[in-house]
Amino acid sequence: ITMFAYFLNAIAMVIDKTLLKRAIKNPFVYTFYIAALGAVLIVLAIPIALIFRLELIWPGWPQFWISMFAGGAFSVGLILMYFALKKTDATRLLPIVGGLTPIFVIILAFFLINESFASKQILAFVLIIIGTFLISLEFIKGGIKFKKLLWLALPSALFFALSYVLTKDVYNHQPFISGFVWTRLGIFVLILLPMLLPKNRYDLFHPGRGKGMAKAKGRFLFGQACGGSSAILIQYAISIASVSLIQALQGTQYVFVFLIVLVTTLYFPKFLKERMSASIIGQKIMAIALIGLGIYFII
C-alpha cells in the first residue's frame, strides 16, 4: 500500500514541478488549490461515512486541536517545499526532504508517541536514508552542492515530520475516517490565512488565461488525483503501522521521481528536462540499490 502510494505521489510531484515553473507562480496559491481539493474529500467522506456506518466522531477538544495542528503543520511543510521547488531541481530537493523527514519522524515519534524499533529496522532506516541523500547529491568540480539544498529542505522536512507524528497520535485515538476528516480540515484552515494578503487573493482569482493555462488545469487535476489518492493510502498506512516505517519507505518515492524525470528528459523534454549524464545516472543507481536493500530489511 505504501509503495504504491509513493509511486502516485511521485507522479504528482513531477507535475507540481512543471506547473510551478511555467503556470502557477505563487506557491501559496498552489497550496490553496491542494487544500481546497482536500476540503472536497472532507465533503465526500461525511456522506460515505454515514452510508457505510463508519465511525465519524467528535474527538473532544484535546484531540481536535491535535488534529488541527497535524493538518496545519502539513500545510506549512507544503508551502516551504513549493517555495524551495521553484529554486532547484525536483530530483535533488525532494530526496533531501525525504531523507530528512524520517530522521525527524524517528526522533519526534520516540519522544511524543513512544515508538521503538528492532535492530533490523534501524539498519533499514540507515540504508534508506543514506540512499535518499546519495540520490540527491550534485557533484560539481570535486565538491558537493548540498548546503543550499539542505537549508531549503530542512524546515519543510521538520514540519512534515511533525504532521506525520501528530497524525499517528490522532489515529491512535480516533477511527480512521474521523481522524482523516479532522486533519484535512486543519490543512484547509491554515492555508486560508495567507489568503488574507491582497497579493495572494489576486493571484488566486487571476490565474491567467489561454491555451497554456487550459493545459495546466488538466495537468493539475491529474496530478492532484494522483496526490489525493496517495494521501489517502499513506494516511491509512499510518493508521495501521509504524509512522517511522511508513516515512522510511518514502525513499521509494524519489526513486520513482528519478525514473519519471529520466524518461521525460530523454523522450519528452518539452514537458520537463533536467541535467543528466552517465555519472549522475550511475550515482542514482547506487542510491537506488541502497534504498532497495533497506526495503528488503523492512519487509
Image (cartoon, rainbow, N blue to C red):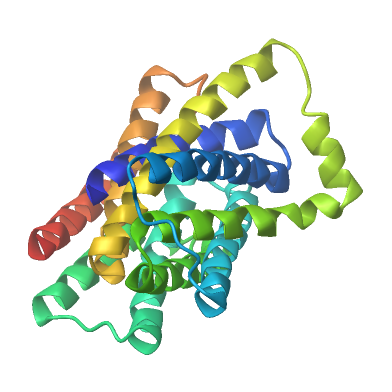
Q: Which is nearer the eye, 125 or 279?
A: 125
Q: Which is nearer the eye, 145 or 9?
A: 9
| Residue in the picture at 71% in, 42% down | 29
Q: Position of residue 183 (x, y in %)?
A: 51, 60
Q: Residue furthest right?
A: 198
Q: Which is nearer the eye, 162 or 152?
A: 162
Q: Position of residue 107 (x, y in %)?
A: 37, 82
Quadrant that contains the C terminus? bottom left
Side (left or right) of 26 relative to 44: right
Q: Position of residue 122 (x, y in %)?
A: 18, 77
Above or below, 230 against 295 in this view is above
* Residue 116 in sight here: yes
Q: Position of residue 137 (x, y in %)?
A: 40, 57
Q: Which of the 4 image quadrants contains residue 292?
A: bottom left
Q: Residue furthest top?
A: 211
* Residue 273 in sight here: no
Side (left or right) of 125 relative to 193: left
Q: Which of the 4 image quadrants contains residue 164?
A: bottom left
